[in-house]
Image (spheres, helix red, strand yellow):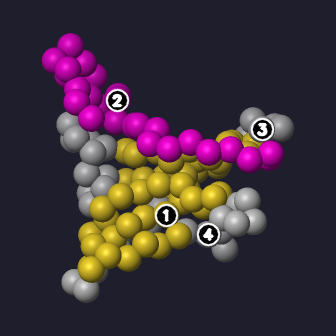
């Protein structure tokens, strides 16, 4: 994402970007990227999943984990066959690529 000169003094305030949005009957799901740099870098940026209840408006935010042995390449939201929405990450490993879907415990 490109940032322009006139927002340069506000970089510390504009550090969040909604990268994906999905919704089901109960909730709205937003994948948020927290980036300190001028461009998105999945390997170093922090990603969170924000879940907003459509009924009450309550929200929860969960930080997606980083794994030292794998380099994050991309994040997204996946809708499973049963209709549940989960965040996922594609990682680069020594042997190729791996996709990991994060599910609630």
Q: Which mark is residue 88?
A: 1
Precedes in sequence: disc 4 or disc 1: 1
- Marks 2 and 3 sit apart, C-alpha to C-alpha, by 26 Å
* Of marks 4 and 2, the one in the foreground: 4
State the extent of the magenta-drawn residues as a range.
1-26
The residue labelled by disc 4 is 103
Quadrant location, the N terminus: top left
Q: Is residue 33 magenta?
A: no
Precedes in sequence: disc 4 or disc 2: 2
The picture quadrant where one finds residue 30 is top right
- Marks 1 and 3 sit apart, C-alpha to C-alpha, by 22 Å
Q: Position of residue 53 (x, y in %)?
A: 75, 43
Precedes in sequence: disc 2 or disc 3: 2
Query: Marks 4 and 3: CB-CB under 8 Å?
Result: no
- Marks 4 and 1 sit apart, C-alpha to C-alpha, by 9 Å
* Of marks 2 and 3, the one in the foreground: 3
The residue labelled by disc 3 is 54
Query: Marks 2 and 1: CB-CB under 8 Å?
Result: no
96 and 91: which is toward the camera: 96
The residue labelled by disc 2 is 14
């Amino acid at each position: 994402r490109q940032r322009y000169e006139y927002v340069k003094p506000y970089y510390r305030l504009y550090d969040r970007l909604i990268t994906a949005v999905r919704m089901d009957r109960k909730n709205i799901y937003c994948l948020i990227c927290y980036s300190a740099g001028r461009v998105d870098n999945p390997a170093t940026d922090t990603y969170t999943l924000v879940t907003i209840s459509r009924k009450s408006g309550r929200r929860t935010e969960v930080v997606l984990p980083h794994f030292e042995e794998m380099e994050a390449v991309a994040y997204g939201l996946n809708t499973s066959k049963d209709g549940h929405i989960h965040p996922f990450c594609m990682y680069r490993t020594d042997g190729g690529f791996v996709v990991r879907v994060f599910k609630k415990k």
